[in-house]
C-alpha cells in the first residue's frame, strides 16, 4: 500500500534518532525497494494482460481470436490510462503524456479490452526500458475511418539486428520479460482490422505506430 508513497516511511533525522549517515542509508534502501516494487507492478500488469487473453469467452478457434466490435469511449479510456501510467513514470523520474488531437472522436468502434491490452503492452515496455527522458502517446485521425496511435520513448530503442524479428512469435532477449508479447499484439491489431509497425526515431528511442 505504501509502494506509491515511499516518503511516508522517510521520517526526518530527529524523529528517527539516528546518525545522518545511517539515515541516508535507510532512505537509499527504501528508494531501492520502491523501484523494485514498480518493476514488479509492471510485470504483474503484463501477466494479467496475458491471462485475460483466454478469459471472458475470448478463445482461439482455428488460429483466430473472437473479438468484440462495439462502440467504446476511447478518450475516456486514454484519460484513465494516463492517470495510471503518469504515476509510474513520475516515480521513475520520467515525463509522460498522451496527446489526443481534436479531430479524434470521443467514441470509436472496436474491442475496448484488446485495445487497452495493446496500448498497455507498449507503455509497460516503454517505461521498463526508459531510464531517462519521457514516454509519449500521440493519437490522431489518419482518415475518415481510421485512427493512428504512436507510442514513443527515449529508451535505448530496438537494435538494428533485432528490428525485423520483434513481432516473431516467442521472440525474446535476455532483458525482456513476460507479457502478451509483440507477436500477440500484432495478431490482436490485425484481427481488429489494423496495422502495427516499428518506426525509427531520428533522436533514438523506440516508436510503435498503430492504425485501426
Image (cartoon, rainbow, N blue to C red):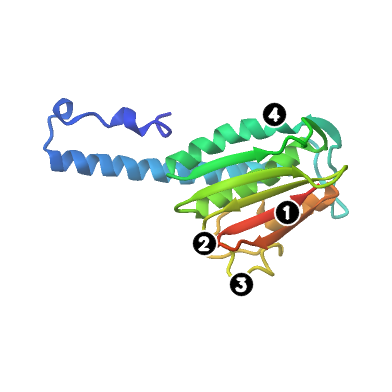
Residue 139 visible somewhere in the drawing: yes
Circle 3 sits on which residue? Answer: 160
Local secondary structure at mark 2: loop
| Sequence-wise first label, 3 or 4 | 4
The quadrant of the image that shows the N terminus is top left
What whole-number distance in Å separates the C-alpha atoms at marks 4 and 2? Answer: 31 Å
The residue lying at 52 percent from left, 55 percent from top is 154
- Name the residue nearer the viewer: 108 or 171: 108
Q: Mark 2 or 1, which is nearer the eye?
A: 2
Who comes first in sequence, dot 4 or dot 2? 4
Q: Splitting the image into 4 quarters, where does residue 120 fall?
A: top right
Within 10 Å of the Cα at label 3, are there few (<14), some (14-19), or many (20+) other Cα atoms? few
Quarter of the image where one finds residue 73? top right
First in sequence: mark 3 or mark 1? 3
Circle 3/circle 1 CB separation < 8 Å: no
Residue 89 screen position, x and y as percent: 49, 42
The Cα atoms of the two marked residues, 2 and 3, are separated by: 11 Å
Q: Is residue 28 left or right of residue 20?
A: right
**Dot 2, crowdedness within 10 Å: few (<14), some or many (≥20)?**
few
Look at mark 1 in the image and give the residue it sits on.
184
The residue wearing badge 2 is 156
Q: Are discs 4 and 1 less than 8 Å apart at CB?
A: no
Residue at figure coordinates x 64%, y 50% from the top left: 151
Q: Which residue is mark 4?
A: 76
Between residue 24 and residue 55, name the one nearer to us: 24
Rendered location of residue 31, percent (x, y): 33, 42
Q: Seen from this angle, which residue lies furthest top?
A: 15
**What residue appears at the point 51 percent right and 48 percent down from the top-left corner?**
134
| Label 4 secondary element | helix
Amino acid at each position: 500500500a505504501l509502494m506509491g508513497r515511499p516518503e511516508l516511511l522517510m521520517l526526518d533525522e530527529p524523529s528517527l534518532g539516528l546518525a545522518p549517515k545511517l539515515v541516508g542509508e535507510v532512505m537509499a534502501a527504501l528508494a531501492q525497494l520502491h523501484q523494485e516494487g514498480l518493476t514488479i507492478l509492471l510485470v504483474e500488469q503484463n501477466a494479467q494482460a496475458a491471462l485475460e487473453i483466454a478469459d471472458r469467452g475470448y478463445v482461439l478457434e482455428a488460429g483466430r481470436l473472437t473479438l468484440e466490435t462495439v462502440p467504446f469511449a476511447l478518450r475516456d479510456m486514454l484519460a484513465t490510462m494516463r492517470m495510471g501510467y503518469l504515476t509510474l513514470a513520475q516515480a521513475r523520474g520520467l515525463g509522460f503524456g498522451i496527446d489526443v488531437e481534436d479531430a479524434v472522436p470521443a467514441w470509436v468502434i472496436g474491442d475496448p479490452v484488446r485495445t487497452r491490452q495493446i496500448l498497455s503492452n507498449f507503455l509497460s515496455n516503454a517505461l521498463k526500458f526508459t531510464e531517462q527522458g519521457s514516454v509519449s502517446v500521440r493519437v490522431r485521425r489518419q482518415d475518415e475511418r481510421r485512427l493512428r496511435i504512436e507510442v514513443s520513448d527515449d529508451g535505448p530503442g530496438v537494435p538494428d539486428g533485432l528490428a525485423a524479428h520483434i513481432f516473431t512469435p516467442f521472440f525474446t532477449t535476455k532483458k525482456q520479460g513476460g507479457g502478451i508479447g509483440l507477436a500477440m499484439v500484432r495478431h490482436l491489431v490485425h484481427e481488429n482490422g489494423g496495422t502495427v509497425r516499428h518506426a525509427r526515431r531520428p533522436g533514438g528511442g523506440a516508436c510503435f505506430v498503430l492504425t485501426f
